[in-house]
Amino acid sequence: MSLTNPVIPGMHPDPSVCRVGEDYYLVCSSFEYFPGVPVFHSRDLVHWRQIGNALDRPGQLALAGAWSSGGIYAPTLRHHDGRFWLIVTNVREGGGNLLCTATDPAGPWSDPVWLPEVAGIDPDLAWDADGNCWCTVAGVSQYRIDPHTGQTFGPARKLWSGTPGAKAPEAPHLYRIGDYWYLLIAEGGTERGHGVSIARSASPNGPFEPCPANPILTHRGTDEPIQNTGHADLVQGPDGSWWMVLLGVRPGGGTPGWHVLGRETFLAPVTWTEDWPVVGDLAPALPTPPWPLHPFPAEPGLDEFDSGELRPHWVSPRERPEKHCTTTERPGWLTLRARGESLDALDVVFLGRRQQHLSCRVRALLDPAEGSGGLAVRFDERHHYEIEAGAGEVRVLARIGQLRTVVASRPVPAGPLVLGIEVDATRELADARSGPDVLSFGLVRPDGGFTVLGTLDGRYLSTEVAGGFTGRVIGMYASAGSVHFDWFDYAGDHL
Ligand code: 6LW
């Protein structure tokens, strides 16, 4: 079996990992989406399955007013004293750093304990042998905290600024390994200059001595297909081997390269030389770990909405109140009810899943008799494409920045219909300016054929155009009234 990176494709950045016995658990950022902080499980570090979301109740996760790419940033997950500890930042007015615990990482997770005096993103947790709990944040600074109450003891103490001249020392993780305390950070910014550096000390509070080989990982200025590599966490396997999880991107198209799935989670092997970690090859082909592989049954791409519970990969911008998103109104169907009668993206009710493959195909059967809605590829409020049915026609729509346009429309008979989206990243580059992929929107005919109504350039739904920290999410929406969806089918790499 060939093993491939990324190990968790699609928008799953800032991974943090821990191991308990033979089980690994991993969490990542979720930004403006609800529920937040997806939790993954693995038995081999290569195959991962989402088992829940740590912040899945409105009392844990308030995102009103969080702009796109605001909200939930960079969690740290640790297992200590028989419990899982999760610390994370909610970047919004009235947000800040919060900590939740669980005995089962699939949930339920506790209500949050807030840390009002901890200033800074990317909080880390580490405990020393005396039982002190150290919270280290981007910058890089450190607080001693009581993780049960969120209280801090004394002001922040500066630990390290990373490599002189490198911007954004962030994503700290502090570990006791052998005779040293190691401080792993990301630096250079989360774009093409991203990298991972490390320092060590005899104490968790420093002084820290930088590794002479810093950055210990970067793909800046290289031809590597995986770029923007950084924001890492270390984990040791049951056999003593060491591994790094980190974020990276897969740019496509000509120059400057566009990445559309957001930042994804990758895995790299780590060895040690003179008590410093050395990161092995980080390539699309993964080395086989020295233990049995543990693949999970393939996740079905088809969702028929037959159970009351939505699977954990479904997310909505900011909130998902039952009155706007329910499987009980018409059993066996998902009903989305719009908030208003306008095309304003904030009135639209959207339920989607991350695009996880460079090429993919989506189909959904919907009944628009009581409203308007359809399928959308969402990057953020100002960058999305959709195919929408309602009022006797089907329309392909695009929003790119300030521009909103109807790309195509045609009348359709009343009744349920199957809409489709096809994302094709396999086309040859025509020239240096070619985009990363093309997206086709259309109707599925009764004979199963696909009638394309509009084809759009994928670069406008990329980080390089839209900006921010997120990636594409594909799903269903209602823009007016109620729209019922019988099923939604996502197939990756079908081409
Ligand atoms: C995160 C920072 C980063 O807080 O991006 O790549 C920010 N690193 O560490 C948001 O994901």
Image (spheres, helix red, strand yellow):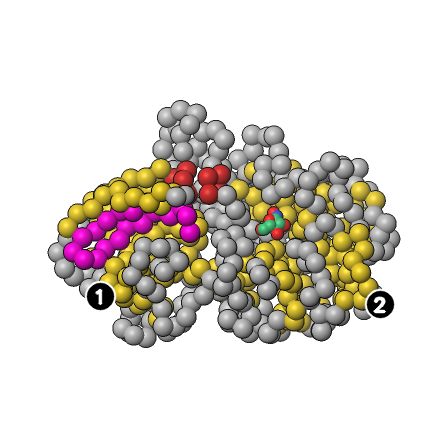
Identify the residue at the far top of this view: 431
The span picked out in magenta is 381-398
Within 10 Å of disc 2 (Cα), the crowding (few <14, some 14-19, many 20+) is: few
Identity, as a three-letter code, of the amino acid under mark 2: Asp
- Give the quadrant of the C terminus: top left
Q: Distance between the residues labelled 1 and 2?
A: 63 Å
Asked whether, in this view, residue 319 is left or right of residue 415, the answer is right
Q: Residue 370 carries which label?
A: 1
Quarter assignment of residue 427: top left
The image position of residue 74, as x and y in percent, is 61, 55
- Residue 356 lies, in percent from the top left, at 44, 50
Quick check: 177 left or right of 263? right
Q: Which tag, 1 or 2, sits closer to the chain's start? A: 2
- Main SS, magenta region, reads strand
Numbered disc 1: secondary structure: loop
Residue placed most toward the observer, 93 or 275: 93
**Which residue is at 78% across, 58% downward?**
156
Q: What residue is shown at x 68% (from left), y 48% (from top)?
A: 170
Q: Residues within 10 Å of mark 1 (few under 14, many from 20)?
A: some
- The residue located at (39%, 58%) in the rendering is 346
- Which residue type does callout 1 highlight? Glu
Instruction: Please say whether residue 244 is visible from this viewpoint.
Output: no
Whether residue 445 is visible to the viewer of this picture, yes or no, is yes
> Is 396 a magenta residue?
yes
Q: Which residue is more in the foreground, 23 or 71?
A: 71
Q: Which SS class for mark 2? A: loop
Q: Where is residue 226 in the image (x, y as percent from the top left)?
A: 55, 38
